[in-house]
Amino acid sequence: MRDLATVMWKEVGEFLGNRTSLRTFALAVAIMGFVPYLVASHGRAHGLTSPIGEILGAMYVLIAVFITVANTATDLVLHERIGRTFDYLLSTRLPDAAIFWGKVLTSTVVGYTAALLAVAAQLLLNAALARQGFSWLYLGSDAGRIVVLGASAALAVYLSVVGTFVALRVGDQRSSYLLTVLSVAVIAVPFVAGWLHPVVTAAWLGPATVVLGAVAIALGLIGTFLFRREMLVLYLQE
């Protein structure tokens, strides 16, 4: 645990020192916090308190996670590849698993934090502009809490694992980000193909979130097995 904390401390420092990552984080929170209210209130007097507004608010929180993690997970790896500091990291006594999970958990925490801040922005904006007092909006329903608190965490872990490995094999920021974003299409395949029919209720969202979380953890365990120094050295030399 100490090794994992050491790596995470280093990664958090690099994230806070990267203006591009901070700018992306801030924009994701601001846009996904304020745009849902503006979209929902267009033609509707009650804004986020309307059924459509509540759905939009919850979905925009997931988009905040999507944007933030896809950028952070890839950037934490590419920053070291470009700066030639990955070799120094691999030469330390730190275990492979600590290095891998340190990067994955850091980008996961960043994405989840973006989700919570976007929720806070939506709640405060609605309270300030809706003239109906403070309201918990979609957080007042089981489905809303599952999406915001559960699905956002599962999605963050999934994208963090995928983004970390994509950045190890693809040395270009734009390509790494695009491939990480496209990985979400894999999750959508069962729905597009008609194998699953989503119903936006807590009874459906709960199991779906558990499945996504299980897939993310399984990918993480596979990543732990594949994240080996001897293989990484070959990747970095390409």
Image (spheres, rainbow, N blue to C red):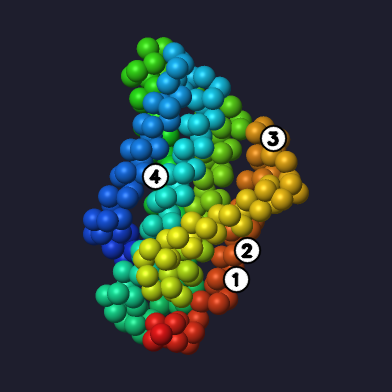
Residue in the image at 58% along x and 27% along y: 141
Q: What residue would you read off at disc 2?
A: 218
Disc 3 residue type (three-letter): Val
Q: Which of marks 3 and 2 is in front?
A: 3
Disc 1 residue type (three-letter): Ile
> Contact, CB < 8 Å: mark 3 with mark 4?
no
Residue 2 seen in this snapshot: no
> Alpha carbon of mark 3 to alpha carbon of mark 2: how far?
25 Å
> Alpha carbon of mark 3 to alpha carbon of mark 4: how far?
26 Å
Residue 180 circle label: none
- Taking depth in this image into account, of 152 and 42 the one nearest to the observer is 42
Q: What residue would you read off at disc 3?
A: 199
Disc 4 residue type (three-letter): Ala
Q: Which of the marked residues, 3 or 1, is nearer the chain's N terminus? A: 3
In x, y percent, where is residue 36? 43, 30
Q: Mark 1 falls on what kind of element?
A: helix
